[in-house]
Amino acid sequence: MEVLVARNEPLRPDDPSQPIRCPHMLATPGLRPHFPAMFVVTESDAAAIRAAFEEGGELSAAVELRRRFPGITDNVQAREHARVIAGWTPIEVPPVKPMPRLRR
């Protein structure tokens, strides 16, 4: 079986380094996750990483990040992510205006 990518280059489906793509299907049997290295940082995670960065520096923030996300095993990558997350500022949520009640 030969699977084609968008550039019409044949891929070997038994090669684990190559993605499996079919032009007419969104999902195929044996399809690997689209973003296996993606992770979600909650506001409480970000606040803890920011606090560690402010109190102990970049290395402390990287340790806190790796404690909360054990899938990150590379120290260089953890330090980079910690710097980025420490630079975030919390989003200010605008106050919710009450809806006027309709009279009947």
Image (spheres, rainbow, N blue to C red):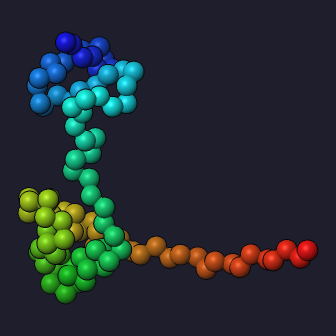
Residue drawn at 22 percent across, 63 percent down: 81
Q: Is residue 79 left or right of residue 39?
A: left
Name the residue nearer the viewer: 86 or 8: 8
Quadrant including the C terminus? bottom right
Residue drawn at 46 percent across, 73 percent down: 91
Q: Is residue 87 visible?
A: no
Q: Is residue 72 visible?
A: yes
Rendered view: 26 above or below 99: above
Residue drawn at 14 percent across, 72 percent down: 67
Rendered view: 25 above or below 103: above
Q: Is residue 92 left or right of residue 100?
A: left
Q: Percent x, y for residue 2? A: 21, 13
Q: Percent x, y for residue 45? A: 28, 74
Residue drawn at 31 percent across, 61 percent down: 40
> Of all residues shown, which one is farthest toward the right?
104
Q: Is residue 91 left or right of residue 39?
A: right
Rendered view: 66 above or below 44: above
Q: Is residue 78 left or right of residue 100?
A: left
Name the residue nearer the viewer: 18 or 29: 29
Rendered view: 79 above or below 26: below
Task: Answer with the quarter of the image where residue 68 lies.
Answer: bottom left
Q: Percent x, y for residue 37? A: 21, 50
Quadrant including the N terminus? top left
